[in-house]
Image (cartoon, rainbow, N blue to C red):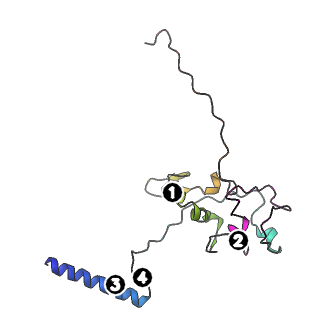
Amino acid sequence: MTGGALIALGAATLAATISASARSGQAPGPPQTPVERPEVPPPPFSEGIFPCSACHADMPVNRTRRALSDMHTDIVLRHDEEHRWCLDCHSAEDRDVLHLASREPVPFEESYRLCGQCHGEKLRDWRAGVHGRRTGEWNGHKQYLLCAHCHNPHQPRFAPVAPKPAPRRPSRGSGAR
């Protein structure tokens, strides 16, 4: 086949793909590969706090930003607190799930999707095993920890660690030269 014939064949294939895409109502693009759901252990809920609906089922939703005074008073929000509040992440309609900015519900076992909306580079590194802790095989089964296993979602920065003194140099003994 000549170079011109290959170009004509490629153009015909592209035209057929675009035509088929137009008929289906979809834009042509690279094939979509489904994102695999990582295996994670259960979220680290505080004792007796989940399911949230156990307390919230009959409670009216109060969407007013406020300091919590009846329950959850131990939670101090230090996570973009000037712009964020509880219902920005927790679903008001179903307290047993979180939600994305699009309002799509997200189970607590997939909270990394919620965190990844703002912390995309960390999500990318987490999936690659560079950020966070991952166990398993190099090219096989893996298990990941959720962001909340290491970070308090309400105060994600780690507390400062006091530096330890520098190690002492070994002294030269009489036999060392």
| Vertical relation: 174 (above or below) 26 | above
Amino acid beneath label 4: Ala
Q: Regarding mark 4 in the picture, which secondary structure is present there?
A: loop
- Left or right: residue 93 versus residue 126 is right
**Which residue: 35% across, 88% down?**
19
For marks 1 and 4, give the CA distance.
34 Å
Instruction: Identify the residue under disc 1.
Output: 142
In front here: 160 or 152? 160
Magenta region: 64-93
- Left or right: residue 5 versus residue 152 is left
**Which residue: 66% across, 42% down?**
160
Do labels 2 and 3 touch, CB within 8 Å? no
Question: Nearer the viewer's eye, disc 1 or disc 4?
Answer: 4
For marks 4 and 3, give the CA distance.
10 Å
In front here: 142 or 94? 94
Specify the quadrant that holds the C terminus.
Answer: top left
Classed neighbour count for the residue bearing mark 1: other residues with Cα under 10 Å, few (<14), some (14–19), many (≥20): some
Instruction: Identify the residue under disc 2.
Output: 91
Amino acid beneath label 3: Thr
Instruction: Identify the residue under disc 4.
Output: 27
Instruction: Identify the residue under disc 3.
Output: 17
